[in-house]
Image: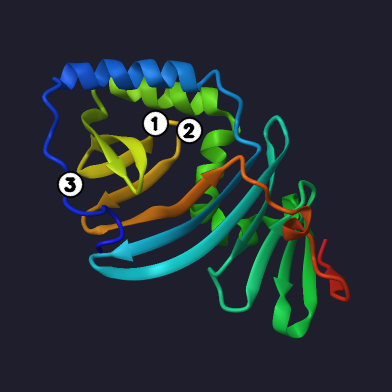
Amino acid sequence: PTFLIPGKTPPPAAETPMGFRDLALSYLASVGEKEPPKTVKYTYKGFTGSKKTVEVRVYAKRLGKEVYAFRVEGFEAGVTILFDGEYVYRYLAAKKISEKYTRESAVSILGKVSEYIEPLANITDMKSFAKYLADLISVGDITIKDVVTLAGKKCFLLEAGGARMWLWAEYPFIVKFECKGKGFTLENLQVNVEIPDDVFKLPSGIKVIEKG
């Protein structure tokens, strides 16, 4: 799809693969020491070939060192998933009701949206994720192919076992992934922008059903 890479993919730069490798390892060493973003929002777009398979909107706000409140909408018609740091809510707007779950009892619900919120898991502990990637690069399991611009963001183009990944050079988000014609992109990815607290709360007048 044309929205994935504006224009044509630029030709490889003159820099050597070893130069890309050293640059990526230096980046990962520094990004692991950064403060995780206070807020994140993006649109997750899955694709198979030229066809869009899903479009999901995700909003997140950091509550503590390793906890983000989040809102996920669009993965299922009429359903929004909210997590306030303690409870998970399955909100059905048309019926004006919401099921309320403890984090432990919401495993199946969180499983349905885990693919879309996985980028949040990667930045919850950026140091560990950065080290994980650096270790794979160091032993050659991941190859650095190029440094490119994707949707206005400088990215490292990585390859591993037939998969291609675009790693943002500012925060460790995989902003695009593809393997055998399938994958996803994170469109309109923004960090440290203002997101009202109401985004992570149920509207007033909603009947809440306790589900344990």
> What x and y, as percent, mark residue 114?
54, 53
Task: Determine the secondary structure under disc 2.
Answer: loop
Tell me which numbered mark, 1 or 3, is placed earlier along the sequence.
3
The answer to whether 196 appears left or right of 137 in the picture is right
Task: Determine the secondary structure under disc 1.
Answer: loop
Residue position marked by numbered label 2 in the rendering: 171
> What x and y, as percent, mark residue 70?
67, 52
Quarter of the picture holding the C terminus: bottom right
Please identify the residue farthest to the bottom as the structure is shown.
Answer: 95
The answer to whether 29 appears left or right of 112 in the picture is left
Q: Disc 1, disc 3: CB below 8 Å?
A: no
Residue position marked by numbered label 3 in the rendering: 9
User: Mark 1 packing: few (<14 Cα in 10 Å), some, or many (20+)?
Assistant: some
Q: Residue at x 81, y 69 (%)?
A: 203
Q: Is residue 97 visible?
A: yes
Most foreground residue, 209 or 148: 148
In the displayed structure, 40 sits above or below 183; it is above
Q: Quadrant of residue 3?
A: bottom left
> What x and y, as percent, mark residue 5?
26, 52
Which mark, residue 169? 1
- Given the image, on which type of amino acid does mark 2 rest? Tyr
